[in-house]
Amino acid sequence: MEHVVPLLWVVVGIFILLTLNLKFKMHNVLALLIVAIFVSVAEGVRIDKIVPIIEKGLGGTLGKLALIIVFGAIIGKMMTDSGASQRIARTIIDRFGVKYLQFSLLLIGTIFGMAMFYEVAFLITAPLVISIAKEAKIPYMKLIVPTVAGATMGHSIFPPQPGPMALVTAFNANISQVYIYGLIVIVPTIICSGVILTKFIPGIAQMPLSENMAPSEEIDLKKAPSFMTSLMVPLIPAFLMIIASIINFSIDSKSTLYQVVNFFGSAEISMLIAVLVSMVVFGYKCGKTSGQVTTMMNEAIAGVSNVLLVISAGGILKEVIIESGVGDHIVGLVEKMPVSPIILAFIITVIIRILTGQGAVAAITAAGIVQPMVAAFNINPVLMVLAIACGSNTITLMYDGGFLLFKETFGISMKDTFKTWGLLELVNSLVGLAVVMLLNIVL
């Protein structure tokens, strides 16, 4: 019972959150804050510790995501207003055809997810995909789902992203095999979650779209940037992050070069550089005045202000769950289960991810628990890396940053978010695990 009661309080808190949102239509920020305080008290957190936890959760989330989200919104806005998004959309439609659009977006999403932080990839691709949907006359969510499916799996499985890199190090796995076996895992997984799933989501064609994300009016493409320019500018963060990761393998971590490379390869600085280039390429070179460029930036920032607040409030509840030690109780419940170490690692990762909303933290926590089993049961460390990676990319609840980013960006309901984001993530994790288990049998 010592492990069950703390989990039950979290379940009660989630039920209260759903009630406040669905029945009383309370704003997400207020609902999340109320539930965070309730769970803190129920879990026995000292009353003088509750406010510091709230501040830590709020500040920690804003500190990590604020600039990334703002910069991503600015780049997306400038791409849309300059016609760059429309240029990419038109070119992709012409080259791939409407019939294969979902598959091409699976590839684009995966590449973006591998190359940059997920929030960056999401905020850059979202307005692009909406423009493609408008051009192709397809309900936008049918194209958003495959893009996000590819981005989340690419981000979860492949180095140089932080989670996969940490897992490779923890299990001393062969990084080349992680790419090879990861490719085998990701192909059927994202086809199931990004293409097949869209055929069964009820009401996907009628889902509303926030006015902030609506594509711009038709722009004369003769005045828009070229296809390569339109594509390369938003990929600047990806190039800088990849270069930094490659160089890191061959230089001393205490050297000045290492520090400089990682400074420019950080999410915030690489995004800042992309914003500055966007101002020139998508602004001034397209005939925009300084005042018009500033107006576009202000509109972009205003459009994501609510998203930032809601995600930050979700960070408060996440911090409460972490600080109260609920994750430790979960581990105590499942770590002695008589199942395959691969499935055990997956289950632990999924539960911790659901409760904390942190994929990397869940992955590393699970790795620490099951690491001794790899040698004891002669498990291929690469398969353990992939199983945990799939577990870290699973269905999340309404206080998770990814869930809230998806919901608030498109302005859809909680129910529709579970039907889209929730289901695509669940399919990602389950199909991914199934492929890993098949590989374990074959290998």
Image (spheres, rainbow, N blue to C red):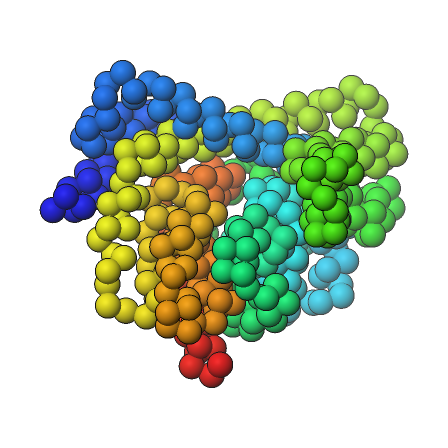
**On the image, which quarter does residue 11 sit in?**
top left
Identified at 42% across, 81% down, the residue is 441
**On the image, which quarter does residue 338 sit in?**
bottom left
Query: Is residue 411 visible to the viewer in this orientation of the structure?
Result: no
Identified at 59% across, 34% down, the residue is 69
**On the image, which quarter does residue 10 sit in?**
top left
Question: Closer to the camera, 372 or 357?
Answer: 372
Give above or below for 91 relative to 69. below
Question: Closer to the camera, 153 or 49?
Answer: 49
- Find residue 150 and report its horizontal and vertical position in percent: 56, 59
Identified at 47% across, 47% down, the residue is 360
Give above or below for 73 relative to 130. above
Give above or below for 406 relative to 132. above
- Find residue 359 and report its horizontal and vertical position in percent: 45, 48
- Find residue 409 and report its horizontal and vertical position in percent: 52, 39
Horizontal arrangement in the rendering, residue 278 relative to residue 314 (left or right): right
Horizontal arrangement in the rendering, residue 159 relative to residue 5 (left or right): right
Question: Closer to the camera, 207 or 336?
Answer: 336
Identified at 88% across, 34% down, the residue is 285
